[in-house]
Image (cartoon, rainbow, N blue to C red):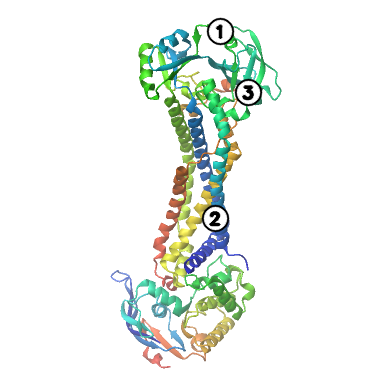
């Protein structure tokens, strides 16, 4: 108990001494919290997207075969599918019809997908939540489309996908195969790409290699690659933002370093007084420890908690311009909160520890000054 | 009782700026007295005070405090002895700005093991003794010179020391306040506290309550002044 | 007299710590609450053969990064806003930017 009481007294002193320069120290904590907030927000967003992608896309197609012509993806003949089917180990082959449609009146890009099980009937569409929210509005009606030949098509909105599917389907428009071919002028013998299902997951790579050998103008994309794309993409995007932040981070570090390490003459005198009054070197260092710990702990907690609220409760509203980019259709960033405890530990060790150490070290020399220095001045 | 045995204190030893502050002092100070170290500035009074108060170690010689040799003790023990045996008043008041009067008075007791409420009670009681109760939550920088002086006395007494050490206590006080200060010292002495003052102010060394004057010059005691 | 400053700080830090733990609890709660949605989205992904999350609809390669030729030098047009570092330094010219701006 006595030991705790002693620490509490030292904290009392530390706080009184911090409050003496109230404005300066509050500004410091605010700037520090802001940095932690930005870093933590980026960590939260990228981690949540990565984990969400990892979970949701587990059921993505195993192998997708694209056809490349002169370095660009082109429609692939249905006949290619028949050939792939002959490879042993292939369970099923299915042609996909999908593509993009640019809506000039709204400036939005839609993803048009054909799903025969869901929508066979021509003249009708099922739209994603983002399309409904941003373009069509709440009222159902018809949507106009301009075909490849300039002809107008009016499709009736049959259904809207549920709002919580936004993260995978915000910009989707499901159309019938007939309408899709008519709209884009794609012949019956062609599909966009081919989805291949394989019996044994361990054979993905072998079968991909066989497809590539059999049909040299194709490119098989494996599901693992898709997931890996997300890992690298969001590590990368997160990294980019961190690099941009690095400038302000450096500025802050210089400021904090100067603030934490520079012992003013007055502080030195105070340490002398405390020593003369019977404080031990360890007690003096403890003051400095608590000074650094208080500032950095407050900043860490404020920053992380605010970032959590920002990302998961307000859907990253501050980052909206960045996240939206040039998109007209953008999903709600209502991400499921995945917190990487390891990342938070890292953030903790990168914020609290260096700052506290930077506060203690320079005071070491002041703390070991002789107590009689006060008498001599 | 404090005994000093062949004490020498040299600053910056071995450097061109080497300077002998105390040059061979043998002295015995009895308890329960008011003793004044008298001498011009630079005579070694302050250095001697800091040696007696366990703030610094002599270059050579030995100091005994109640028959205990303290010169060879490690720093931690010296600090503990300093805290429990001595109360200090400095030439500059050396109060800490930004803290309240009460906090300043409690400061020397922070590293001790006494309970908070007991400590606070003690500090408030001291402030009451020096009629400073109404100022207990005031900031140091709002005090008048006399009030600040009384706060330093309260601070020196908070650990209930048996010896009070004051270095030029009246240097920043006017005649009236100096008089009050000596009255307080007299009272404390009557209550049993030994008092050791370094001063060249006649208000102090000519005061009737003084038991003994030790005159110093150039780091040595002046023999004629040694008589009480 | 006033409350001790150390108590205020310790209380504040404790509250922060509780909020910090609360953050993990809330996250776990949200995650289990969104299990149903997750399952539904997985079904949708399987049924429609989707390959990507719908996060950025700016361009083909941001909408479907998994399907894009990430290493083709010019993806849609030379000055497109893309995710290679050069794209964040060199915006499209103004007359192109006004088109499709929101």
The chain under label 1 reads A
- The residue where tag 3 is placed is A131
- The residue where tag 2 is placed is C13
Kindly report the distance in space between the C-alpha atoms of the residues bearing marks 2 and 1: 65 Å
- Residue A73 sits above or below residue C34 on the image: above
Task: Classify residue A174 as left or right of residue B42.
Answer: right
**Along the line of sight, which residue is nearer the eye, B37 or A164?**
A164
Q: Position of residue A71 (x, y in %)?
A: 42, 14
- The residue where tag 1 is placed is A185
The chain under label 2 reads C
Circle 1 Cα neighbour tier, 10 Å, few/some/many (<14 / 14–19 / ≥20): few
Q: Position of residue A354 (x, y in %)?
A: 43, 51
**Along the line of sight, which residue is nearer the eye, A339 or B134?**
A339
Which label belongs to residue A1?
none
Whether pointer 2 and pointer 3 mark residues with C-beta atoms closer than 8 Å, the reply is: no
Q: Quadrant of the C terminus of chain B?
A: bottom left
- Residue A361 sits above or below residue B42 on the image: above
């Amino acid at each position: 108990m006595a030991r705790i009481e002693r620490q509490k007294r030292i904290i009392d002193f530390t706080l009184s001494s911090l409050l003496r320069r109230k404005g300066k120290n509050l500004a410091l904590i605010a700037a520090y919290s802001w940095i932690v907030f930005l870093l933590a927000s980026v960590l939260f967003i990228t981690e949540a997207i990565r984990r969400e992608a990892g979970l949701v896309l587990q059921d993505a197609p195993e192998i997708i075969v694209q056809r490349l012509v002169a370095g660009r993806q082109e429609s692939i003949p249905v006949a290619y599918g028949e050939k792939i089917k002959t490879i042993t180990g292939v369970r099923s082959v299915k042609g996909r019809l999908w593509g993009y449609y640019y809506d000039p009146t709204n400036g939005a890009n839609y993803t048009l997908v054909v799903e025969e099980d869901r929508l066979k009937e021509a003249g009708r569409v099922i739209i994603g939540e983002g399309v409904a929210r941003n373009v069509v509005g709440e009222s159902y009606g018809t949507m106009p489309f301009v075909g490849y030949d300039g002809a107008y098509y009016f499709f009736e909105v049959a259904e809207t996908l549920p709002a919580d599917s936004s993260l995978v389907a915000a910009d989707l428009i499901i159309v019938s195969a007939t309408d899709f071919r008519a709209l884009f002028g794609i012949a019956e013998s062609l599909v966009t790409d081919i989805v291949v299902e394989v019996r044994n997951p361990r054979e993905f790579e072998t079968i991909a290699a066989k497809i590539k050998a059999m049909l040299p103008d194709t490119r098989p994309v494996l599901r693992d690659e898709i997931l890996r794309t997300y890992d690298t993409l969001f590590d990368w995007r997160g990294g980019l933002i961190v690099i941009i932040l690095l400038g302000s981070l450096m500025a802050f570090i210089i400021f904090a370093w100067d603030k934490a390490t520079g012992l003013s003459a007055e502080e030195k005198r105070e340490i002398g007084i405390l020593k003369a009054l019977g404080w031990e070197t360890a007690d003096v260092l403890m003051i400095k420890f608590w000074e650094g710990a208080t500032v950095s702990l407050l900043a860490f907690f404020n920053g992380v908690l605010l970032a959590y609220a920002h990302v998961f409760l307000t859907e990253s509203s501050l980052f909206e311009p960045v996240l939206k980019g040039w998109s007209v259709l953008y999903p709600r960033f209502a991400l499921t909160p995945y917190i990487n405890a390891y990342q938070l530990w890292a953030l903790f060790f990168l914020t609290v520890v260096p700052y506290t150490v930077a506060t203690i070290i320079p005071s070491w020399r002041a703390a070991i000054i002789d107590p009689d220095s006060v008498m001599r001045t | 009782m404090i005994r000093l045995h062949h004490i020498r204190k040299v600053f910056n030893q071995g450097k061109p700026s080497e300077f002998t502050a105390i040059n061979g002092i043998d002295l015995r100070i009895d308890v329960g007295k008011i003793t004044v170290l008298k001498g011009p500035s630079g005579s070694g009074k302050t250095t001697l005070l800091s040696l007696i108060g366990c703030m610094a170690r002599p270059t050579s010689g030995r100091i005994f405090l109640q028959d205990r040799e303290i010169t060879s003790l490690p720093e931690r023990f010296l600090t503990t002895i300093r805290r429990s045996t001595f109360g200090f008043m400095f030439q500059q008041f050396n109060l800490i700005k930004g803290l309240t009067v009460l906090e300043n008075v409690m400061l020397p007791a922070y590293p001790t093991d006494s309970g908070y409420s007991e400590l606070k009670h003690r500090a408030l009681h001291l402030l009451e003794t020096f009629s400073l109760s109404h100022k207990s939550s005031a900031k140091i920088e709002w005090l008048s010179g006399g009030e600040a002086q009384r706060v330093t006395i309260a601070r020196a007494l908070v650990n209930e020391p048996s010896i009070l050490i004051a270095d030029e206590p009246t240097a920043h006080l006017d005649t009236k306040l100096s008089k009050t200060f000596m009255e307080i010292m007299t009272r404390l002495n009557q209550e049993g506290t030994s008092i050791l003052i370094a001063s060249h102010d006649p208000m102090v060394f000519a005061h009737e309550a003084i038991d003994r004057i030790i005159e110093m010059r150039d780091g040595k005691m002046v023999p004629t002044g040694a008589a009480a | 007299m006033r409350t001790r400053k150390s108590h205020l700080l310790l209380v504040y830090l404790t509250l922060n710590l509780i909020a910090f733990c609360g953050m993990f609890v809330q996250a776990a709660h949200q995650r289990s609450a969104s299990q149903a949605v997750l399952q539904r989205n997985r079904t949708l992904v399987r049924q429609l053969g989707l390959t990507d999350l719908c996060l950025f609809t700016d361009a083909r390669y941001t909408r479907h990064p998994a399907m894009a030729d990430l290493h083709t030098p010019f993806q849609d047009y030379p000055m497109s806003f893309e995710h290679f570092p050069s794209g964040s330094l060199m915006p499209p010219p103004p007359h192109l930017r006004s088109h499709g701006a929101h």
